[in-house]
Image: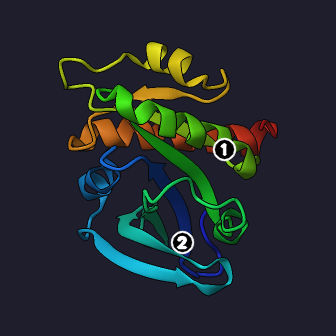
Amino acid sequence: MSQNKSNEAIILKIIIQGAFSSGKTSFIEAVSEYGVTSVNVWYPYYNTFLVWDFGLVKGGKDLTILVLGASSTGVMKSEILPILKQSVIGYVLMVDSSDPATFLESQARVRSLDVIKGRPVVVAANKQDKPYAWSPDDLRIALDIPPEIPVVPCVATDKESVKRVLVTLIDEVLKVIIMGKH
């Protein structure tokens, strides 16, 4: 990344989505340098609440990455996503790979990803440390995840595992910037 010549801080957003108990908050806690803050936000126009978990990652003195965990109160309304796209560099979809009962909701979330075309997406196959966790390859098949979306093994409570997911997302962002893919 080139140096910011205007000396203005750059803030980039990554949105974390997933079913209830998929590991969104744990993911943010593992990577945030300042803890996690939760906020309830009312969107009156859409007549809905979203609960957000916020975490910050410093990428140098002028770069901050804001990691936002979206509420798990159903699939995020497609009307709200365009509002959130401003300065969002990508999305992480958390899937509890040890709980097939959540796969149907996760599959619906995968289908809703077409709403956010133009922004890279990575699927985090979370809870890979559990004895009955499905492999990333098996999750890809079960959830019908398109081949262009990376599925990365993850343990959301492990900082290095979370970093691997974020590095994969950054790689996808760079592909879009450099090669114009997506």
Residue bearing mark 1: 113
User: In the image, 132: left or right of 126?
Assistant: left
Picture quarter with the C terminus: top right
Q: Sequence order check: which comes first, mark 1 or mark 2? A: 2
Q: Residue at x 55, y 28 (%)?
A: 150
Q: Secondary structure at mark 1?
A: helix
The amino acid type found where label 1 is placed reads Leu
Picture quarter with the N terminus: bottom right
User: In the image, 94: left or right of 146?
Assistant: left
Image height check: is 87 above or below 72? Answer: below
Residue 43: image x %, image y %? 58, 81
Image height check: is 14 above or below 36? Answer: above
The amino acid type found where label 2 is placed reads Ile
User: In the image, 60: left or right of 130?
Assistant: right
Mark sitting on residue 11: 2
Q: Residue at x 21, y 40 (%)?
A: 158
